[in-house]
Image (cartoon, rainbow, N blue to C red):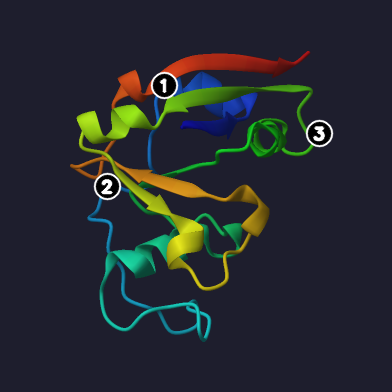
Amino acid sequence: MVLYRGINPELHEQIAGELIPKDARPFVRSPEYGRAEWGNFFWGECEANAVVEHQQHQAGYPTSGVSTTPHLNRAIFYATHDGKYSYGFVYVIDETLCQIHNVTIYVVKDIVPSPSIPEDDEIILVAHDFGVLPRTLVTEIRKIGA
């Protein structure tokens, strides 16, 4: 399967083709009072709570995960921020390379009772060391728009 990650021009210039998470801590969380929604978290510290927090309200809570989608149109939406940018970039990721590079795949809809953006069919990728994902996962970088 092919996965996509939409990147705006400013971020693309900063990260230069890398898949960099916002945090490098282990991919586990406990539900946090005031942040966790009733019915959309799990008791105790676990990976499922990290998945919930990663995608929750698209608030940008820092985790060691990197968001992707199997839908090109959703990646284009994020690359251009729904038209805020006249162009953007879509990183094409070969999901079969994840196992080879010891990258864990979390399918949000299989874990989170109520995903924040269900149409994304978000898939979170986490490196074995919780850091930058291997560059070889990105098989192509497509410029989208002007």
Q: Secondary structure at mark 3?
A: loop
**Image quarter (top left, top right, bottom left or bottom right) of the C terminus:** top right
Instruction: Indicate the amino acid at tag 1.
Output: Val
| Residue 98 against residue 119 in the figure, above or below | above
| Residue 67 against residue 62 in the figure, above or below | above
| Circle 1 Cα neighbour tier, 10 Å, few/some/many (<14 / 14–19 / ≥20) | many
Q: In the image, residue 140 lies at what x, y percent?
A: 49, 15
Instruction: Indicate the amino acid at tag 3.
Output: Gly
The residue sitting at 24% across, 53% down in the picture is: 25
Instruction: Indicate the amino acid at tag 2.
Output: Ala
Q: Which mark is residue 83?
A: 3
C-alpha gap between disc 3 and disc 2: 31 Å
| Circle 3 Cα neighbour tier, 10 Å, few/some/many (<14 / 14–19 / ≥20) | few
Q: Nearer the viewer, residue 69 or 13?
A: 69
| In this picture, residue 108 sits left or right of residue 84 | left
3 or 2: tag closer to the N-terminus: 2
Residue position for label 2: 24
The residue sitting at 61% across, 22% down in the picture is: 89
Q: In the image, residue 21 lies at what x, y percent?
A: 38, 42
C-alpha gap between disc 3 and disc 1: 24 Å
The residue sitting at 57% across, 50% down in the picture is: 121
Residue position for label 1: 138
Q: Secondary structure at mark 1?
A: strand
2 or 1: tag closer to the N-terminus: 2
Look at the image and tell me whether residue 121 can be seen: yes
Q: Quadrant of residue 44?
A: bottom left
The residue sitting at 21% across, 29% down in the picture is: 100
Q: Quadrant of residue 93?
A: top left
| Residue 53 against residue 33 in the figure, above or below | above
